[in-house]
Image (cartoon, helix red, strand yellow):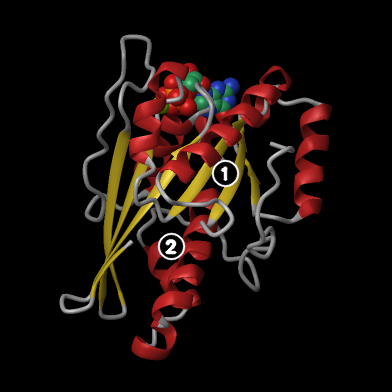
Amino acid sequence: MQFNTAQRELTLKIVYYGPGLSGKTTNLRALYQRIQPSLRGHLMTLDTADDRTLFFDTLPLVFRAGNLKVKIKLFTVPGQVMHNSTRRIVLQGADAIAFIADSQPSKRQENYKYWLNMVENLKANGLTIETLPNVVQWNKKDLGDATTAEAIEKMRKEGKQPVYEAVAVRGEGVVETFLGLVELTFEQIDRIYLLSDKIGLDRRSFVEEVRRCLVDPPPLKAGGNPDKGGGTPPATGTV
Ligand SMILES: Nc1nc2c(ncn2[C@@H]2O[C@H](COP(=O)(O)OP(=O)(O)OP(=O)(O)O)[C@@H](O)[C@H]2O)c(=O)[nH]1
Ligand SMILES: [Mg+2]
């Protein structure tokens, strides 16, 4: 996180992490479609011929919240095993993580492996998932089965982080995942910088400003995000 108090500029880095082909790039593409054109930057993707991310994708979003200029920089990591060093680099300075799990039953081990891989790469960057705002999105809901539903239910019960379901290829669940993570991230920043006390910017108005950046935002849920788990460390065995 960069917070330039003189220029009243806040920059946040959000990283979409997860196994290969789980839909990280698809999430960013869908989000791009939903951000007001005047507020979004270029969606930069660099793919191989078969659409696999080679380095990373980026999408910046710039808006005002109170008298703060806010930049949210979204990144995806490349999921292929051989790109681990790139994944590690992309995690540098991350403020929040959206972990994109694959709902296909055959991908359960892969999800778990990449969760551990993320934990390890965070550690290499001096970060820890215990203190980093994070949400889990089970993407490809259309390809899940009853055992996936059970795994999701179990994770929700553990309540360690917000859990979302998505069909990113149809744009479903993408904005909800993003907004849920933005909310958690703001809470974290507020704890450090006391933005509510110092500049009168509270969580509700911050999230509202982000919602205003979107074309056709989802309806507001009373009392914020009902999936929210309470910010305790996520389990490593259930993704
Ligand atoms: N059925 C289904 N397919 C999806 C969904 N989301 C993404 N896909 C497809 O899954 C494939 C991989 O999606 P990507 O977004 O490129 O995956 P990625 O996680 O960025 O993959 P890497 O960059 O290799 O790590 C593409 O063919 C997408 O169209 C979904 O919700 N359901
Ligand atoms: Mg990708």
Does any atom of ligand 1 lie closer than 8 Å to the CB of label 1? Answer: no
Q: Which residue is at 26% across, 50% downward?
A: 40
Q: Is residue 90 above or below residue 190?
A: above
The quadrant in which the C terminus is found is: top right
Does any atom of ligand 1 lie closer than 8 Å to the CB of label 2? Answer: no
Question: As shown in the figure, which amino acid type bears the numbered disc 2?
Answer: Arg
- Give residue 217's position: percent from left, percent from top: 47, 57
Question: As shown in the figure, which amino acid type bears the numbered disc 1?
Answer: Gly
- Give residue 138's position: percent from left, percent from top: 63, 37
- Mark number for residue 211? 2
The quadrant in which the N terminus is found is: bottom left
Left or right relative to 27: residue 22: right
| Disc 2 crowd, CA 10 A, few/some/many (<14, 14-19, 20+) | some
- Give residue 229's position: percent from left, percent from top: 69, 60
Front-most of 46 and 88? 88
Residue 13 in sight in this render = yes
Residue 11 quadrant: bottom left
Front-most of 226 and 78? 78
Left or right relative to 106: residue 40: left
Left or right relative to 176: residue 69: left
Q: Which residue is at 53% across, 63% downward?
A: 184
Q: Are marks 1 and 2 in contact (CB under 8 Å)?
A: no
As helix, strand or loop, the secondary structure at mark 2 comes to helix
Front-most of 123 and 18? 123
- Give residue 228's position: percent from left, percent from top: 66, 61
Q: Which residue is at 39% across, 55% downward?
A: 214
Residue 33 in sight in this render = no
The residue most toward the left is 7
- Measure how far apart labels 1 and 2 are at the Cα level: 14 Å
Give the residue pinned by disc 1: 173
Residue 159 quadrant: bottom right
As helix, strand or loop, the secondary structure at mark 1 comes to loop
